[in-house]
Image (spheres, rainbow, N blue to C red):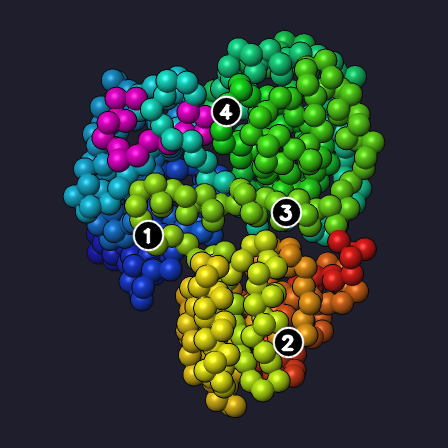
Amino acid sequence: MIGSAERAESQASDERHRYLAHTEVAIGPRERLVVGGILRPDTTADLEPDVQVDALLPHDAGLVLERAEPDLVIVESRAVAAGNPWAGAGEPGIADVALRLLGVLDGARALGRPSVLWWSGPRHATPGLIPFESRFDLVVASDPGPGVAASAWTPGLQLARFDPIGGDPDRSVRPVAHVRWDEAPSRSARSFMEGALAGLATEEPELWIDADAVVGATWLPDRLRSAGLRRVAHEALAELYRARGLFLADPLTVSPGMRPIATGTLRQLASGARVVSGPNESLAESLGEWIEWAPDARQVRDAVRSGAGLGPRTTADIRRLLGALFLRHDTTGAVGALARMLGIRRATPRRDCCAVARFDAHTRPEAFLDAVVLQRHRPTEAIIAADDPADAAIALWELERLGIPVRSVPPPGAERGVARWAASHTSAAWLWVWSPGFENDPAYLIDALTAGLMTGASAIGCVPGASDGFCDGSQLKGPVVSRAAAARLPDMGSVWTRSWKDRGATFYGIATDPDGR
């Protein structure tokens, strides 16, 4: 038996650990948004690299709000469905949970923090939340639908979870349908899916459902019930996606005008797989070239066979696809969009890149400016150090004309490396340490930041003629360096890659050979 003294000591230790976990509250200025969340674990896994998620549970939500003082509170509708700690919130027969949810919203308002209701599923799945809508500062939805007072929003795609580089080249091309079989879609979408699966019977599709779906398959076509459903836990999702080469889009089709693109389809693409989809305007507009299209249900089988016949995507293909996903659909951008909806100025700097240049007698600003202008994803800011004030003035004027904030600072002393020096002058997550004579293509920063977000590498750069992959001590050209690594590791010099590697840093090389793209 545990005595009362031991129990009190254990409880105090647990509370201390919970408090210390909120490091972005306790130490220094916050560099990420802090979210108090009533969220599913899968959603938390998508958001956490970009925000600090403090889970709100019915028994301790008030304490967490008080300790963490989050920037905002998010309530996900699917997190109050059966099988979750907040199950039944708002239902007439479960008054206690409803009162605790009201306490969360009142606590957020008392702290002056906005609250967001995210309809991640259809309203009829969690009707108890409908009366709460007026108590939230903002209501967003994965599919707002006609006549619904909500803004379109999803958390986007966490590229790091589904990194396909170096994946199995012999992926299975047996079609997979990973669908919310526990939530009946609209009549038209359900009819399309049933017709498509009827035509795919000879292809023996795999049928997956989320492991946390408590209700079970409520609308699986009768002819497929004998095939069985594979339950997939969110922790294993990325590994399973990378092992499959062909998916039916989730959802397979949508009503005209639906926005935004469902996270399920984005995940399938990010794993490097080929995706078959029925009509979907938003998907066609944003990522149409990467989809095997089936205009009607009868043509899904032909699209599946076509996709299987194409085989695995090449490394060059995957690299371009990941760049498109990074630009338009990654979680960092989605978090920033939600912050702007709420009027929160500070979001997450994970995709912010500061261009760093030092001008001397042998380095002119014109080459640097040409390299910046060339980029499809431009730096969010720049730091210029110039021996000649006139050179700094040229760069300053041109960059500000492009809308890129720039600071001109005194050059670092000879004893200081430029990366470590620049790390103390910016809050951007990445430093593009530009060097003269470095010629890059318009997608260079897209490729570099995508690789950085996926792999967590300390530095990413060009390796002429090399393939994509981790480098082993090679000198990277025009490196994009993690600010955190630059701040703590030795100054960059002629052997900086070796000295960084000795301290556990990793490097990612990007091929500059056009045939390698």
Q: Residue at x 49, y 29 (%)?
A: 259
Q: Residue at x 64, y 38 (%)?
A: 269
Q: How far across and down, in percent of the image, does residue 277 sit?
A: 65, 25
Amino acid type at image mark 4: Met
| SS of the residue under disc 4 | loop
Q: Dividing the picture into quarters, in which one does residue 298 lie? A: top right
Q: Do the residues under discs 1 and 4 have CB atoms within 8 angstroms?
A: no
Q: Is residue 318 above or below residue 144?
A: below
Query: Of the residues under marks 1 and 4, which one precedes in the sequence?
Result: 4
Return the residue at label 4. 258
Q: Nearer the viewer, mark 4 or mark 3?
A: 4
**Lateral position of residue 276 relative to residue 424, left or right:** right
Q: How far across and down, in percent of the image, does residue 483 sit?
A: 49, 68
Return the residue at label 2. 436
Q: Is residue 502 above or below residue 67?
A: below
| SS of the residue under disc 3 | helix
- Res. 173 visible in picture: yes
Return the residue at label 3. 322
Relative depth, front residue between 322 and 406: 406
Amino acid type at image mark 3: Leu
Q: Residue at x 45, y 70 (%)?
A: 396
Q: Residue at x 49, y 31 (%)?
A: 260
